Image (cartoon, rainbow, N blue to C red):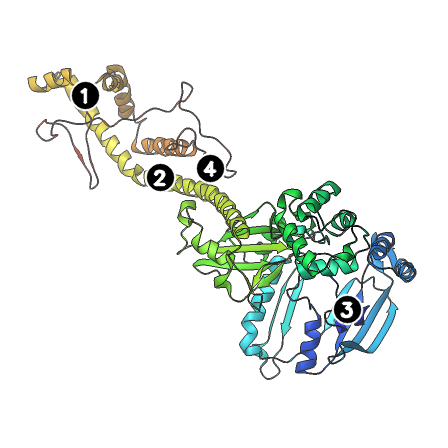
Amino acid sequence: AIPDLLGRVLSGSKYGVRQTRGKFGLGAKMALIWSKKSTGVPIRIKTSHVSADANKRKKKRKSDSDDDDDDEEEEDDVGKNNEIVGGRKVGKIISTCVLDIDIYKNQPRVIQHTQEPNTEQWIGTEIQVLVAGNWTTYKSRVVQYLRQLAIITPYARLEMTYSNRSDEKKGMNFKFERRSEQMPPAAREVKHHPSSVNNLLVQQLLERTNAKTLVKFLTNDLSGITPASARRLIERLGNSFEPDMDPADLDDKLVTRFVQVLRSADDLFKSPDGGCLSPLGEYNLNLGIQKVVEPDIIATARDKPGAYDGHPFIVEAAVSLGGKDAKEGITVVRFANRIPLLFEGGADVATRVANGKIKWSSYKIDHKRDKIGVFVSIVSTKVPFKGTGKEYIGDDIIEIQQSVKRALQNCCQQLRAHLTKKNALRDVKERKSRLLKYIPDVSRSVFGILEAMQKRKSEEAESGPRYSSPRKRIAGAGAGSSRQQHLKPTESEVFSVLERVSNGDLTEDTIKEHLVEAVEENVNAGLGFDENEEVFGKVGTSKSKKVGEDDDRQAVYLVPIYDDPKTAGKVVIRHPLFDFFPLNA
């Protein structure tokens, strides 16, 4: 099977559709052709793998081929070539093949094909290819491709070694270790959806079908059509079609009519199902980006499966901020069927949506200064590439464009929630820092006022009380609200504080300690946040307390001063940033 797999170009068949990793349908055959063209050296393949269950393969082979006897013999050989070692299945033999390709006859030319016992319980495939190229010119592209391949395949270990014979310093070696043990499920092959067929494909299906009636052909060779919907479809086709007619009787004119009705009768059958696809998964995508990019924060999302022209697709996206070697602005990384796309990124749907359809400022992200990484992976049974090189996906398919936009918006909403928490925590820290900065000056000033008040009380005790002017007494009696009167300390409270100052129990250091404790308590309790907002600590889940009867915090008010402190004869504490004086001094 190895020579036919790698040494024969375009040898596949189209009995159904399936998500494939390739873009041209050539795969590793292109490596063999490139090697033959550039160096002429044949390739070497070493493989040992676990074959599928014999019964399943036998059933599939019977449905695809009429040669049942050969299939049964093959399945017997498959069962014999497997064994269980250490709880896992391994191949009993290792096959080694050295082959070339006859380009003119499109046939493999086997130079060596040997088999040996698998004593090391080795599983995998190795392909050695010698090609010629300009390393200096394409070095960056090769490294870029491997980095992006490591993102989209975190379950694989990638290593590349380059040695320069003329200058050893120019050599390089880098590797990406496996980070995930969860591989995506294999993509399933499904029958063609009625909305995806064309004249050529229908003619091929009519030639291969074993159905004897048109109803059987519709239900067995196409997906999503029940016998009842098949009969209703035949009614729409007109008098030239009958449910029991032989599909082989359809000529070119009838095939054209048949295809036109199939592609327009969306109400008779279900939309394509995305269950046959094999997306990478948000978990693996997150691990792959963390492994290669090492961002500060990352959000991933997967949009619901969609369909266009009868082909299902799934869009997965991730948005990261920061990271190793990240650049300012938006950097878009694109994948199609889990294959990196390097060229013509400006015209791709992911780039155009990221640059033109997303309002980054709405999510507290600066798209010009922040280091934003946008990762979009699209899987489908038919990726709508544009151009001959198949290097980008156009934005003309509205379904894919909207799916990419929804996935990116989902990621941005996750980042906005995190950035809101981060900014709130930063504001709390800044507020705490500003308050702590002025505590020494406030403590010194308050203690100076208290000392002055204590000294004046001592003088009044010796020489008698002082009386304020009539104007001041009238202003003091008529001014002030009930709240101000409530905040005014009583004589006993004033006497108690001044007594502590006189005894040395209340000093500048004790005032400073109490202020620091108050700042710590209020900031940690979420002072300055709305009662419905969160206080974001280490875990980011605690809620701020509601100000109620059980709250021991005290409200602080700024009381307006209508008299000039200089003319009113009040004691003023001068400071470069403020003037402070007590109301009752």
Quarter occupied by the C terminus:
top left
Residue 1, image x and y in percent?
82, 68
Q: Dot 3: within a 10 Å radius of its alpha carbon, few (fewer than 14), some, or many (20 or more) residues?
A: some
- Disc 1 crowd, CA 10 A, few/some/many (<14, 14-19, 20+): some
The residue labelled by disc 2 is 431
Marks 3/4: CA–CA distance = 58 Å
What amino acid type is highlighted by mark number 3? Leu
Task: Report helix, strand or loop for mark 3.
Answer: helix
Q: Are marks 4 and 2 in contact (CB under 8 Å)?
A: no
Few, some or many residues within 10 Å of mark 4 (<14, 14–19, 20+): many
The correct choice, above or below, for 269 with respect to 551 in the image is below
Residue 362 placed where, x, y %? Answer: 41, 45
Q: CA distance from mark 1 to mark 4?
A: 48 Å
Q: Earlier in the sequence, mark 1 or mark 4?
A: 1
* Dot in front, 1 or 3: 3
Which secondary structure, mark 4? Answer: loop
Mark before the other along the chain sequence, 2 or 1 = 2
Q: Residue at x 50, y 37 (%)?
A: 540
Is residue 18 rendered to the left or right of residue 490? Answer: right
Distance between the alpha carbons at the discs numbered 3 and 2:
68 Å
| CA separation in Å, label 4 and label 2 | 14 Å
Kind of residue at disc 4: Phe
* Residue highlighted by disc 3: 5
Residue ID for mark 4? 536
Closer to the chain start, of discs 1 and 3, is: 3
From the image, tell me which residue sits under label 1: 457
Camera sees residue 280: no
Please state which of the two labelled residues, at mark 2 or mark 1, is closer to the viewer: 2
